[in-house]
Image (cartoon, grey):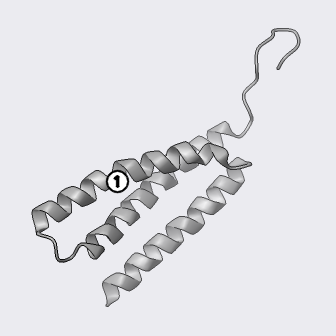
Amino acid sequence: MSAATGRRELRRDWLAKTLAGLLLGFTLAVGASGLLGLALAGVAAPARSQLMMWAVMPVWLGVFSGVYFFASGLRAWLWLVAANTLVFGALAVARAF
């Protein structure tokens, strides 16, 4: 808190965390939706596509809100890059078989 103004100052890394959650959280949600689509291969196509579409937003918002628990913006970026690599790697392996 600033003594002169009595206002709390923002942390320096809030922008890095916000962008990590916004960009990498979205790609992570899309990848998770793709894995869900592969897991629900036996479900009819219209229902499966609706489930995949509606699964993106809760995952994205969960990641976007949870990104502020990271100690720094760099750590948020690194963990989300690792999570995206894992999800899209699993998606590539699952689609290959």
Crowdedness near tag 1: few (<14), some (14–19) or many (≥20) residues, C-alpha within 10 Å: many
Q: Quadrant of the C terminus?
A: bottom left
Residue at 27 percent of width and 51 percent of height: 54
Residue at the image point whose x is 33% and y is 88% from the top: 96
**Residue 93 figure quarter:** bottom left
Judge left or right: residue 14 versus residue 29: right
Element class at badge 1: helix
Image coordinates of residue 79 in percent, x first then y, are: 63, 61
- Viewed as shown, does residue 66 lie left or right of 70? left
Q: Quadrant of the N terminus?
A: top right
Q: Nearer the viewer, residue 40 or 72?
A: 40
Vertical relation: 23 (above or below) 47? above
Q: Quadrant of residue 95?
A: bottom left
Q: Which residue does the numbered mark 1 point to in the structure image?
A: 56
Q: Position of residue 82 (x, y in %)?
A: 59, 68
Please name the amino acid that badge 1 sits on: Val
Question: Which residue does the image show at 66% across and 37% down from the upper left?
Answer: 14
Q: Residue at x 51, y 50 (%)?
A: 63
Q: Number of numbered discs present? A: 1
Across and down, in percent, residue 26 comes to 43, 53
